[in-house]
Amino acid sequence: MALRKLSSTDAFIVTDLDDVPSFGIVRSAPKILQGGAKDLARSMTYSFASFELQFGGASGGINAKPDERGEAVESFVNEIQEVVQDGSLGLDPGKGISAGGFDALAAADSRNKVRFEIFQEDPLHLFLSGLGPVECADHLLGLDGKKVAIEGFGAHSVAMVELLVERGAQVVGISTLSGSMSNSGGFSAEEIRDAWKNRGADFVTGGGEEAEPAWKIFQCETDILFTGSKMGAVNHTTAEKLDIKALIPHQPIPFTTKALAVLQRKDCLVAPCFIPIAGPLFSYWSDDKSEIADIVAKASSEMKLALDEANGHEDGLFLGSCYRAEAFLASWQKNLPFGRPLAS
């Protein structure tokens, strides 16, 4: 794990593997912890390895207060643009950074620009981010007739809701940074898209009313919980109280090591984050002649194959998925990275 501190602003980049093209996200806040960035980079490495891609994970942090963020992001972009242009690094905007702030990096990035094309109603990378968790849940348990909740709803979750409803699930609970809401009969996909478009994360407050606390999502009566508000969102205390059939990540590293152990003891199926969040990877280096529908179909089939190969392992789905990724890493890396994609 290598650390680069930038000189033009208070920021850093970590790359998980040495001398390997590396890709990931950058977040901005008054203080971004390097430990969290390293965890995100590790998760991305395992995503690449799960689909036999010889790339490493990366992650960055820009430490800036809101009123200083625009200038800090601009300095960050200017300083790393050359290394992005040569193909050795690719970074996307994460929490705290607007997509427009990284336009110059997106233009210089070696990855296929098809990821920004609109598929159905969303940019392809957002649609694929929503597809992955849904595809994994449907393949592992089946969604028809299931009640599901989404903890940590984001831009990609709009497509998630549409795909979930399309496959026969009822979305009965949603939480955002602004709070949570529930509906035992299930939310309408059309209403959720309109609400997100008009109000963003505040749509859970309804017609000006105060939203329920975000943590109430964990009390929702549901078969499947999609989680992803932050790293370690589900800890062992929360896990003890959950009564669900499956926990499916839709963002990196949303549960702790202890939470995994608790849920497995309760016979709850826990998917590793690095498979369901991998959808966008299939657009990064796709053939220019590929139709978008073919990219989507490949993402679906490859994720299901990865789950099938790991799920039969005697140590369970999570470790089986780790072993599978590590076997590929060992085939081209002299040393395996230390530590698996789990929150502490």
Image (tube, grey):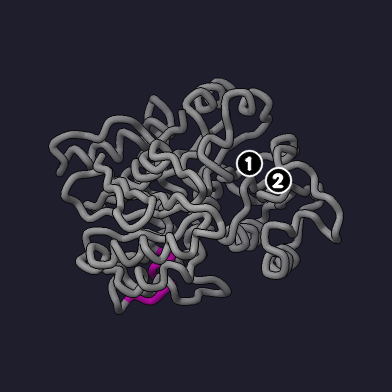
Residue at 40% over, 66% down: 74
Q: Disc 2 to disc 1, how far (Cα)?
A: 7 Å
Label 2 sits on residue = 147
Q: Earlier in the sequence, mark 2 or mark 1?
A: 2
Q: Is residue 168 left or right of residue 301?
A: right
Q: Which residues are magenta?
A: 290-297
Q: Nearer the viewer, residue 178 or 293?
A: 178
Question: Circle 1 sits in a helix, a strand or a loop, which is it?
Answer: strand
The image shows residue 199 at horizontal and vertical percentages of: 72, 65
Question: Circle 2 sits in a helix, a strand or a loop, which is it?
Answer: strand
Looking at the picture, does residue 21 appear above or below residue 110?
Answer: above
Residue 224 numbered mark, or none = 1
Residue at 19% over, 51% down: 20
Disc 1 marks a residue whose amino acid type is Ile
Residue at 58% over, 24% down: 236
Number of other residues with Cα within 10 Å of mark 2, as a class: few under 14, some 14 to 19, many 20 or more: many
Looking at the picture, does residue 101 appear above or below residue 253?
Answer: below
Q: How many marks?
A: 2
Q: Pointer 2 and pointer 1: residues touching (CB < 8 Å)? A: yes
Check the picture and name the quadrant holding the N terminus: top left
